[in-house]
């Protein structure tokens, strides 16, 4: 939605741990320095998504030899492996300019770490067609209860629908009472003591609340059920959120902090370009020699990991087994895929009778991660036939498609190429599960039927496009190596997120800050371990955390004048709120 110029900006720091990762790596700064004896140390990085690639890239700059493993396949990827994880851009033909973003598709301008790497790699972005973001988005159509409302901005919708205006007014007043605008101002002012105080109060106040409770409870927004339904169907951020009613309110606040008031961007060539640059872009190690992840991995990631043996002595590293029968020992391992895989696909075991690699608290946290389904179905078209119609922008509806987007990628790359994408549907949670068992054709038929009813003037051309254009779809909960697109917590899961975030910030003896956890050379990273899930920027930050932990384990040190994430973990202005303080006044 269009940002209010008078409002504080979206937060570029995660309020649970307000460390400025982008500033820490500004210019050519590295995380620190390894002793000569650790230079060239092999480190296994499992998963070539955002967190894994970022960890591997920073480890390479430190002087390690990061060895990447990846389970996803792609005919055009290096060695038949697909880079990027949820950074999954699909170009059907080399002549197409059109790209279907099957995973990550929009990025708030608050994502300073993401843009640090985009700038480093020479990648540009353009504004994303988000709902109510006029003039980037020519029109947003809000269709609810069989009635369509054509608007340009959120202010238009407020002026034309009294029920929504009442709901939205209550919503803004509730956020003001909760202190969210003041928290944003504290982040913008870099007043970390205020950030810690205000955010801790929000966590204590709402950790047991769902989003729905906040909307309905008199101590929250105090809405009627009808007002809550209208607000959440119209969308109060980058989604139509009644499907998120069961999400923990604290995670909802984190989502708002990162995006509300931000300008959202996209990568014209697809976000997969960022993954490809992490892989191929040459950098220098501490000795000044140029190299790349592609070079140190001999042109391709290793295959899927099937098992990891973790000795109780961190000095003995880890042993990684892969799907091709390979077995190799590393000084450390960084595991970045969905943590569900540690229960279903990847066997994590002790070595030589040592302790379980994850103690009781972290085992409980891994088993308690809540993943959310998401699904997308799109048509790839020769031309943007919707120009000048009510379909030219974003459609939000209470019908099956829930959210539809149109995109024009400009002139094709070659003769016969396609330039336009119509996302027929992008859904989350139970909305995504409704069509999980449907075939691609069944999905297209159902979405086209509903969108044609919402946009009768475009109905015939929409049907023709669906009959002739190629279609693609994904249900992330059905993808074996993902089993959901992202982790979003439910009430009561703060303590699990606290433990997962702290696991990788180990000391030089391999000891984890979580009480009772064994010392070893295994580090967990990825979106699951981030305080703010779903955003690529925060997944990248977990890769930096893991690289810092590995550096420390190998005897490295950061710059005394620029302390790293692990150095500040117990600082009162940075320290995440411990779970045993949740109930404190």
Image (tube, rainbow, N blue to C red):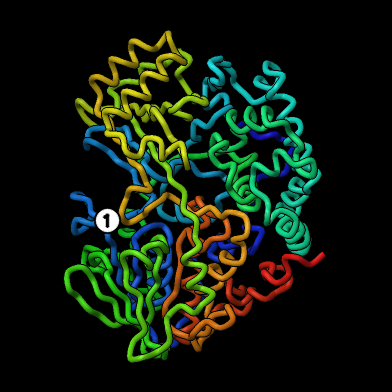
Nearest the eye: 148 or 138: 148
Residue 252, percent from left and from top: 62, 47
Q: Residue at x 64, y 44 (%)?
A: 211
Residue 307, located in which quarter of the rendered image? Answer: bottom left
Element class at badge 1: loop
**From where the camera sits, is residue 190 visible?**
no
Quick check: 162 left or right of 21?
A: right
Q: How many marks?
A: 1
Q: Is residue 350 above or below residue 305?
A: below
Q: Residue at x 37, y 40 (%)?
A: 101
| Residue density around tag 1, few if under 14, some if 14–19, many if 20 or more, within 10 Å | many
Residue 192, percent from left and from top: 73, 62
Residue 330, percent from left and from top: 32, 81
Residue 556, percent from left and from top: 49, 83
Q: Residue at x 72, y 65 (%)?
A: 582
Q: Is residue 318 above or below residue 246?
A: below
Quick check: 333 left or right of 513?
A: left
Quick check: 489 left or right of 159?
A: left
Q: Quadrant of the N terminus?
A: top right
Q: Which residue is mark 1?
A: 72
């Amino acid at each position: 939605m269009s940002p209010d110029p008078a409002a504080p900006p979206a937060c570029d720091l995660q309020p649970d741990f307000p460390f400025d990762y982008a500033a820490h790596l500004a210019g050519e700064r590295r995380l620190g320095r390894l002793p000569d004896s650790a230079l060239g140390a092999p480190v296994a990085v499992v998963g070539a998504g955002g967190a894994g690639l970022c960890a591997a890239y920073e480890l390479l700059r430190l002087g390690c030899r990061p060895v990447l493993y990846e389970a996803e396949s792609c005919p055009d990827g290096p060695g038949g492996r697909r880079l990027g994880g949820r950074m999954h851009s699909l170009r059907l033909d080399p002549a197409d300019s059109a790209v279907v973003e099957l995973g990550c598709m929009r990025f708030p301008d608050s994502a300073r770490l993401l843009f640090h790497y985009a700038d480093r790699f020479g990648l540009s972005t353009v504004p994303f067609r988000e709902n109510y973001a006029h003039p980037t988005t020519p029109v947003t159509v809000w269709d609810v209860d069989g009635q369509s409302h054509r608007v340009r901005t959120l202010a238009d919708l407020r002026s034309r629908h009294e029920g929504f205006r009442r709901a939205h007014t209550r919503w803004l007043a509730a956020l003001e009472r909760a202190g969210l605008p003041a928290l944003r101002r504290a982040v913008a002012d870099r007043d970390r003591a205020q950030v810690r105080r205000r955010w801790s109060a929000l966590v204590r106040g709402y950790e047991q609340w769902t989003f729905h409770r906040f909307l309905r409870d008199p101590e929250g927004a105090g809405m009627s059920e009808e007002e809550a339904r209208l607000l959440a169907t119209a969308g109060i951020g980058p989604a139509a959120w009644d499907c998120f009613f069961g999400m923990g309110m604290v995670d909802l606040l984190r989502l708002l902090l990162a995006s509300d008031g931000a300008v959202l961007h996209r990568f014209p060539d697809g976000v997969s370009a960022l993954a490809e640059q992490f892989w191929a872009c040459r950098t220098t190690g501490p000795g000044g020699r140029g190299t790349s992840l592609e070079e140190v991995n001999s042109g391709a990631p290793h295959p899927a990991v099937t098992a990891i043996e973790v000795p109780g002595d961190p000095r003995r590293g880890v042993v990684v087994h892969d799907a091709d029968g390979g077995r190799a020992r590393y000084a450390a391992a960084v595991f970045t895929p969905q943590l569900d895989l540690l229960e279903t696909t990847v066997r994590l075991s002790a070595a030589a009778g040592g302790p379980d690699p994850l103690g009781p608290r972290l085992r409980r946290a891994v088993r308690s991660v809540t993943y959310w389904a998401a699904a997308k179905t799109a048509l790839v078209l020769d031309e943007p036939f919707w120009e000048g119609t009510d379909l030219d922008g974003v459609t939000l509806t209470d019908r099956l498609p829930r959210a539809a987007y149109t995109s024009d990628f400009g002139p094709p790359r070659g003769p016969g190429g396609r330039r336009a994408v119509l996302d027929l549907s992008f859904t989350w949670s139970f909305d995504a599960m409704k069509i999980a068992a449907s075939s691609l054709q069944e999905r297209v038929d159902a979405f086209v039927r509903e969108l044609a009813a919402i946009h009768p003037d475009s109905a015939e051309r929409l049907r023709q496009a669906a009959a002739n254009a190629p279609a693609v779809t994904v249900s992330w909960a059905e993808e074996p190596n993902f089993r959901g697109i992202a982790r979003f917590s439910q009430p009561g899961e703060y303590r699990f997120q606290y433990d997962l975030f702290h696991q990788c910030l180990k000391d030089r003896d391999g000891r984890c800050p979580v009480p009772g956890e064994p010392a070893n050379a295994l580090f967990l990273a990825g979106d699951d371990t981030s305080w703010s899930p779903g955003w690529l920027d925060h997944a990248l930050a977990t890769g930096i955390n893991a690289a810092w932990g590995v550096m420390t384990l190998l005897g490295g040190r950061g710059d005394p004048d620029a302390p790293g994430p692990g150095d500040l973990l117990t600082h009162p202005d940075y320290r995440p709120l411990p779970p045993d303080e949740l109930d404190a006044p």
